[in-house]
Image (spheres, rainbow, N blue to C red):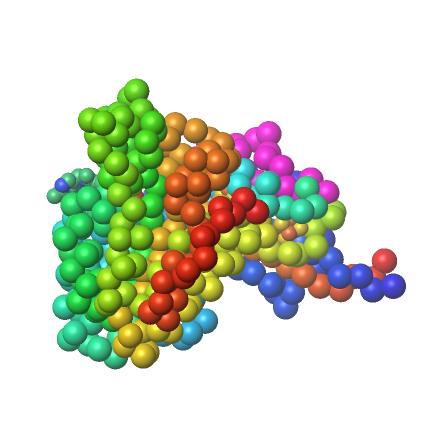
Amino acid sequence: MEEPFVKTEIRKDENIVYKRTDLLVDRPLSYCPGCGHGVVHRLLMETLEEMDIQDKTIGVSPVGCSVLAYDFMNIDMLGAAHGRAPALATAIKRLWPDRFVFTYQGDGDLAAIGTAETIHACNRGENFTIIFINNGIYGMTGGQMAPTTLPGMRSSTSPYGRDVQTMGHPLKITELISNLPGVHYVTRQAVHTPSHVRKTKKAIRKALEQQKESKGIAFIEVVSNCNSGWKMTPVQSNKWMEENMFPFYPLGDIKVDGKLVEKKEVTEKA
Amino acid sequence: MAKIKGDILVNVERCKGCEVCIAACPSSTIAMSKEVNGKGYHFAMKVNNDCTGCMNCAIVCPDGVITVYRGKISE
Ligand SMILES: Cc1ncc(C[n+]2csc(CCOP(=O)(O)OP(=O)(O)O)c2C)c(N)n1
Ligand code: SF4
Ligand code: SF4
Ligand code: SF4
Ligand SMILES: [Mg+2]
């Protein structure tokens, strides 16, 4: 097929202002179309490249859709048992304090089966970065209810919507851990629009820079879509996320430089 | 007069047709193809010459399939 509207005067190597980073392995990502996991993978790799720390970074991948993160991120990585990434990252960082260490975890991994590991690593004030992808569901296994599932939200195990009377309240684990003294930086971001992507990338940079000072856990929650689990198109799911997830999980900084952010965060729609 | 213009190159076989880039483009430069790629996805393609090279589409693309160019053009 002939490609229309090609600007041959512009499409030259010296004019490239953006291309996929080589730190992402050159193979298709295993994620569903429009899934936020892919964006966060890319931002993380771009940040390592910009800081030129790819050879000094060790990542820990979870169990969940991003179980194969080590196949996509071209850096040293280990796969943890379900929920145990913060325990593994603790060992890695203590053995190699000069390395940059991060965990990459979903909400089922971090806030359900791994709750104990999450809370204790945060409370101990380990010096690594946690990237937490909250899509309010167990994406990988077919969209079951997670601790983070919203009240009234449908999932394959709450087909009539989450009833808090019988199924309990959603767990705001990010707010919870922000109260722990070992936690230095906590923020909640998103990656579905260009401005949100830019903010998330800044947050990732800040979190990794913090490791140089050994000040404790840096925790970045990314509220993301699971369009397959939510049974929507990617674009619909992003809209649904703005209307339903953000009011419950408001975006913005929660703790900066070891201090809780006082102001009440307003939900962003931009 | 020299003008700053942009262009995008979509890796058609890697595009998953999610349409997230369409909403991100301020100049309505992207639409989905009628054809499908080898995986059966409609793919992102340029439908006008208004690209400014702002990179919005590329940074929201979950699969990182868009390369963005920006340069001077004499018109
Ligand atoms: C010990 C153990 N229990 C349960 C499972 C099944 N399992 C695999 S992934 C997953 C949940 C993943 O959800 P989440 O962490 O939110 O990741 P997502 O896929 O949504 O990104 C579960 C329960 C497992 N693999 N191992
Ligand atoms: S199931 Fe959900 S979280 Fe997993 S890749 Fe698909 S959209 Fe993403
Ligand atoms: S955002 Fe990327 S994968 Fe989705 S349609 Fe656009 S170019 Fe294709
Ligand atoms: S670079 Fe900007 S103007 Fe060009 S297609 Fe992408 S979003 Fe549209
Ligand atoms: Mg999940």
Residue B44, given in percent of the width and then of the height, sits at 57, 40
Q: Is A176 situated left or right of B52 in this image?
A: left
Residue depicted at 70% across the width and 46% down the height: B27
Classify B14 as above or below A168: below
Residue depicted at 26% across the width and 30% down the height: A164
Magenta region's main secondary structure? strand
Between residues B17 and A91, which one lies in front from this camera angle?
A91
Res A46 → quadrant: bottom left
Residue A100, given in percent of the width and then of the height, sits at 29, 72
The segment highlighted magenta reads B29-48
Residue depicted at 27% across the width and 59% down the height: A179
Q: Is residue B38 magenta?
A: yes
Classify B39 as above or below A133: above
Asked if one can make out residue B11 in the rendered structure from this viewpoint, the answer is no
Residue depicted at 68% across the width and 43% down the height: B29
Classify A17 as above or below B56: below
Residue B73, given in percent of the width and then of the height, sits at 78, 61
Res A84 → quadrant: bottom left
